[in-house]
Amino acid sequence: MQKQTISLTVNDKKFTLDIDVRQSLADVLRKQGFTSVKQGCGVGECGACTVLVDDMAVDSCIYLAVWADNKKVRTTEGECRNGKLSPVQQAYVDAGAVQCGFCTPGLVMTTTSFLERNRDRKVTREEIRTGHAGNLCRCTGYETIVKAVEKIVDVAEEE
Amino acid sequence: MAVGKSPVRKDAVAKVTGKARYTDDFIMPGMLHAKYVRSPVGHGIVKSLDAKEALALPGVEAVFTYEDVPDIVYATAGHPFSLEVDHQDVADRKLLTKHVRYHGDEVAIVVARDPLTAEEAARKVKVEYEEFPVCVTHEAALAHDAPKIHAGGNVIKSHSFEVGGNLDQALSESDVVVEGEFKTPVVQHCHMENHTAYAYMDDHEHIVVVSSTQIPHICRRIVGEALGISWGRVRVIKPYIGGGFGNKQDVVLEPMAAFLTMKMDGAPVKLELNREECLVSTRTRHSTKSRCRIGATRDGALKGIDLDLVSNTGAYASHGHSIPSAGGAKSVNLYPRNVVKYSALTHYANIPSAGAMRAYGSPQVIFAIESAMEDAARAIGMDSVDFRIRNVAREQDVNPLSQKKISSAGICECLEKGRKMIGWDEKRKQYADQTGDVRRGLGVACFSYGSGTYPVCVEIAGCRLILNQDGSVHMQLGATEIGQGSDTAFAQMAAETLGVDYDKIHVVSTQDTDVSPFDTGAYASRQSYVVAPAIRKAALELKRKILGHVREMTGKAAEGMTIAGGKIVNQNRPERVVLDLAEVAIDAYYHKQRGGQLTADVSHKTRTNAPSYGCTFVDLEVDVPMCKVKINQIINVHDAGVIIHPLLAEGQVHGGMGMAVGMALFEELLIDPKSGWVHNSNLLDYKIPTFVDIPNLECAFVETVEPTSAYGHKSLGEPPIISPAPAIRNAILDATGVAVNEAPMTPKVLFRHFSQAGII
């Protein structure tokens, strides 16, 4: 087993960790207590483990932890500050977009990244759907999640 | 008033912030990890098994085989125990097996110090098999010379009923009799959290199992049965669970986890399936083949329905014949004024075991009936909606099977509402006689369902309410939150009856069979209906105790007071506050002479079962040369009685519709008919709908008031999945004139049908 020391920030906290080089970022984050990072498939199909690495959404189950060295990682635990939900989290709550909740942390991060990428432009419902297509949900039929995203982005009029 | 509003669901904040803990989020020091050794053949027997190499691997603690497990054959289906021996579930498996019955069957299990080592060791267990002939399909499993999958043969059970008169006579009185053969696929739940459980012992007697289960109390009993130990030795804890949809209404991992911790001197042992195992080696939906005949007169009177259905339960019975049995029975509520003849047979085959899945047989039965109803409407030249309105249940009809009066039925209004919402009458005219490549069509289908399992099973529910020192109320239930929002609905009910704010009701979401009241769990869309009376009784009892204590404190008659907004008020003049609830509570707890902890603990058996109703309307287009379907609009309209929480109710409907669109258009577990090999056991190749595959989902409600229900409500969890598939089939028929009597209606399937029909 080969070990390597990595330094990264998770939700603005610094971590220096000795890790097994085979470990995924998801495994390492979960071990550090970031259990919002869920595992639904382990092979990058379901998106439940989505986190932001340098503000880009990745499937942390197929993202090696060593690649996160010197990078900035965000999980849904860190989006809630001083007891106040982030706008994305609040939108999910208000829209009724949460059911079993297993896909929710990953989706919250995908939406967070989607929102940050589309700050200065209007987006269509189609773009919202495409922009979230890497995250599977079996409870909602995606309807309320689309509506949650529409609460916080600038929605373009449908043609 | 709390019922009928949409307060923030109890677990929403925990779930968006990642604070909600699921089974895998609990880790114990020294936890061991187990991995099954699975059969690579579809049917056969183990000739030899050599675990030497696996045991030699550093970190491997033990390997157990079929020779090491208790010689106990048990049943896994998550039904309540039945006092009637004939009604008990089919016991047909041991913890591990020498006779493997599907590709993925479990012959041995490895226990190691970490999951990677367990996986590697499982691969190093050398097993030789003698292969037997494999039967995958209905035809192969029921052939005279079919290999016996279990000692008793391949047929598990069959049953039939004929109610509402005589079918032959009804068909002879019909002007038109239509007939069709229908097929529904093996589909899988694909809840986002795979099956996972761990177990440990906290002394020499007691085994604690933490599991992602819908049915903790049933699970406790089945662990006891499977291991031959008394049920009280087992404690099952259910944290948050990442979806179940019926797949966790089966006891899949828990007996093995419990067995392993006993073998490992009580050390914590975890058994976590990966997605591939979850798709193949948990449960699926029964595939069916059926023949349906419908007779009607030209003026639109439905005379008789004849349905003959064969259901494939796979390698082990699990819920087995209960599925077609329930599917047939629950559908009789839909068209109760005509003859219904139903016969069903369930058989084994060398494919993954089928068990409970959302709506439990009804999607298969209704696919056939509502497709044939469409054909009948067309044969008599009547509008599809009008034909259904003419024949669906009305209040005061008597269900000819149960002989019970139907006391609320909003299906007529649902059909009227849906017809308006989709613009049925205008579009029907607009879509007539299309000939181009892309053709639009309209479809409709209805369903009926039950609210629970009574009188087939016992319906028992428990609720415990505790007044806290600060005037808030703790609520404990045996019923389980599995994502549907039951904790929230239950809190609303308690708030409504007790007169305290919803925010003051704290629901203990985790079930622990050592602590939680007895309840059989989440299935059959039972919980809101059968738990409500327990909650109502408990709330009334707690209210009586609180007012009794107020009388002791104040000397005022309890009859003149009530609780409103968390305060004790004058019944006639609620603006007059007598005391705050917190003042009463603190006095009851700490006054040296009077009071005590104020609680109510109620167990209630429900002895009614209200039918719920609904329908789907769909507007779609078919690209005929491309054999592709695009849904332009889809609407579900439901009669679930009084809607407790409109936002959550809509969520249930959307989720069911989304899953149904998957079953109708994309999903099928593909099994090689020769080898039993599952081709697509992963989420890339097994096509559950993604964001871009699902159209906008619309829903509406017709609120009836069900008199047998504590708050006027009826079932809603499973029903939304039932009618979309036949509505889609009927819309494809409307668009193209081709009856596609099988799901999923993929381009490949449509190509075959369109070619046969000569339209491409």
Image (cartoon, rainbow, N blue to C red):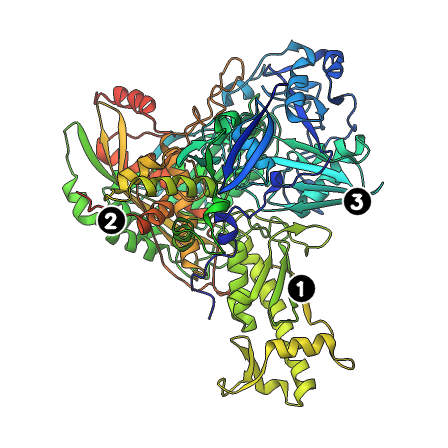
What residue is shown with label 3?
Answer: B233
Q: Secondary structure at mark 3?
A: helix
Q: Chain of mark 2?
A: B
Tell me which label, 2 or 3, sits earlier in the chain. 3
Q: Chain of mark 1?
A: B
Side of B112 relative to B420 (left or right) = right
What residue is shown with label 2?
Answer: B422
Rate crowding at label 3 as few (under 14), some (14 to 19) or many (20 or more) other CA atoms within 10 Å.
some
**Disc 2 and disc 1: Cα gap in Å?**
45 Å
State the count of labels. Answer: 3
Quarter-of-image position of residue B434? top left
What residue is shown with label 1?
Answer: B602
Q: Secondary structure at mark 1?
A: strand
| Position of residue B394 measured from the top left corner of the image (x, y, whole percent) | 39, 58
Quarter-of-image position of residue B508? bottom right
Q: Is residue A46 above or below residue A102?
A: above
Rate crowding at label 2 as few (under 14), some (14 to 19) or many (20 or more) other CA atoms within 10 Å.
some
